[in-house]
Image: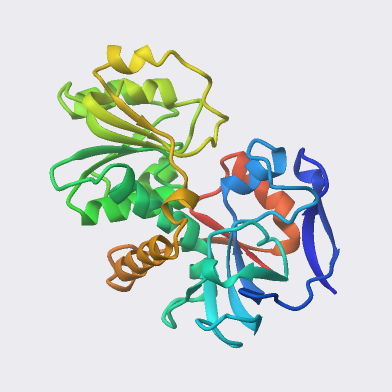
Amino acid sequence: MTKAFVIHEYGGPEVLKWQDVEVGDPGPGEVRLRHKAVGLNFIDVYHRTGLYPLPALPAVPGMEGAGVVEAVGEDVTEFRAGDRVAYAHPPGAYSEVRLIPAAKLVALPGALSFEQGAAMMLKGMTARYLLYGCYNALPGDVVLIHAGAGGVGQILVQWAKAKGVTVIATAGSVEKAALVTGLGAEHVINYQSEDFVARVKDITHGRGVHVVYDGVGQATFLKSLDCLRPLGTMVSFGNASGPVEPFNIGLLAAKGSLFLTRPSLMTYTATREGLLAHARDLFEVVARGVVKIAEGRTRPLVEAPQAQQEMEGRRTIGSTILIP
């Protein structure tokens, strides 16, 4: 027997039940993994509430983790017991031990800690598809990154800077704004005290930005459209403030023939080749020191409900790591 958080119904943090689970031996193509660190992400909240329904209940949530392979099933040739690995999908990370398809794992470089692995896989590969897949940001482009002090935001700001992009970012406090400035953003807007649309127009001399990367959702979506230049791209990749409400698609024409995408990391890494490419590029920029992975607060895994509440209340900076 081992322990895990199990959801039997959708709802608030109280539906996360810490209980005994039976893991068993890995089947064909599977690995039994003992977690050393687990990442906390907003998608965990969406799974808990049912905004993004899980395939079936009961289920163990949690998308991101790093640990050591304990055993491998038939047909697994890429990994063996003792290997250090990390992943960003599928759910099941809120556990001490789990079974996972070997095809979803990547080898964790020895220079990276388990905590870094759990802080970077989902968020870092998200930054990769945002900057190369949804919109290939090029030197001279101007981008707006919402929640620059968040787990994805910090990586995104640094990686965009490394590509020669001019970064405008938003943050929700003086402390967070200072942090984002330190990461290299040329302009940081405190959305609590400033109108970010007006500031973006001022910074860009009325032209607007080439792309908006928005993981906040409802609170920023419509205003973000007003930050774009004609033919600009709106990338809505999260719902931290709630889901975006239905809107008239004609707004995209009225505001400058804008492009809109609602991407998912699972689509961009659906193939083994796509997953390895995203992980390879992420590990490369981290190894070069271009992107530094900030390990935020570390908490015991059993405190996952409280950690989710902190994140929902926007009281976190960077990544929160859960330790089994």
What residue appears at the point 41 percent right and 81 percent down from the top-left corner?
111
What residue appears at the point 73 percent right and 56 percent down from the top-left corner?
60
Indicate whether 70 appears above or below 12. Answer: below
How many callouts does the rendering have?
A: 0
Visible residue check, residue 149? yes
Report the coloring of the rendering.
Answer: rainbow
What residue appears at the point 40 percent right and 16 percent down from the top-left corner?
249
Residue 271 x %, y %: 44, 60
- Could you tell whether 130 is left or right of 65 in the image? left
- Could you tell whether 211 is left or right of 70 in the image? left
66 and 179: which is toward the camera: 66
Indicate whether 4 appears above or below 169. Answer: below
Q: In which quarter of the image is residue 220?
A: top left
Indicate whether 255 appears above or below 143. Answer: above
Visible residue check, residue 181? no
Quarter of the image for the N terminus: give it: bottom right
- Could you tell whether 162 is left or right of 150 in the image? left
Residue 16 x %, y %: 79, 50
Residue 247 x %, y %: 47, 16
Residue 302 x %, y %: 76, 61
Quarter of the image for the C terminus: give it: bottom right
